[in-house]
Image (spheres, helix red, strand yellow):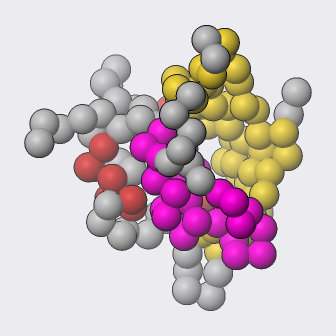
Amino acid sequence: MKPVECPCGGASPERRTSDRAPLYAECCGRFIEDGALPANAMELMRSRYTAYVLGNTPYLRMTWAENTCPADLDASGDTGTRWLGLQIKRHVRLDEHHAEVEFVARYKTGGRAHRLHETSRFIRNAQHRWLYVDGEIKS
């Protein structure tokens, strides 16, 4: 299989050492495919964006806090959305178990371009896994 660029594009300026996006296997693929644990909420956010691009509902469920994960979550059937890019605007670790990530995800649906600007909240559970809790949409 030919190596492919990661859909998240590296998303964080400090990770970008060239104009080329990192390879999927070296970036989000290690979390989604290989089961590695994201070291922080920003890595989890990037991998969740990539899972949406790939339609990987099981990974999204696994990385979503159980008490806030929607029962009808299904990213695999959403073929009308084309994800265009991710920009991480801010990553703040509030304490050992809480963090926030502000991001903008661009996408197209029905021929129209959209932006999802959100500040997401994350928790780190007893097994040291970062989990998405919820988010506040920015206008």
Which quarter of the image is occupied by the N terminus?
A: top left
Between 42 and 116, the one lying in front of the other is: 116
Q: Is residue 13 magenta?
A: no
Instruction: Using residue 97 as the reference point, say whether residue 37 is left or right of it.
Output: left
Quadrant hosting residue 125: bottom right
Image point 70% across, 20% down: which residue?
A: 114
Q: Is residue 68 magenta?
A: yes
Between 96 and 77, the one lying in front of the other is: 77
Q: Is residue 104 visible?
A: yes
Relative height, residue 109 to residue 75 (above, below) = above
Between 62 and 72, the one lying in front of the other is: 72
Q: How many marks?
A: 0
Instruction: Using residue 62 as the reference point, say whether residue 92 is left or right of it.
Output: right
Relative height, residue 13 to residue 41 (above, below) = above
Give residue 54's position: percent from left, percent from top. 43, 43
Instruction: Using residue 114 as the reference point, say whether residue 32 is left or right of it.
Output: left
Q: Is residue 12 visible?
A: no
Q: Residue furthest toward the bottom?
A: 126
Relative height, residue 101 to residue 111 (above, below) = below
Image point 54% across, 70% down: which residue?
A: 62
Q: Residue furthest toward the top?
A: 111
Give residue 109's position: percent from left, percent from top. 63, 22
Which quarter of the image is occupied by the C terminus?
A: top right
Quadrant hosting residue 98: bottom right
Image point 61% across, 11% down: which residue?
A: 111
Give residue 51's position: percent from left, percent from top. 48, 49
Q: Residue furthest toward the left?
A: 1
Q: Which residues are magenta?
A: 45-73
Image point 85% across, 46% down: which residue?
A: 136
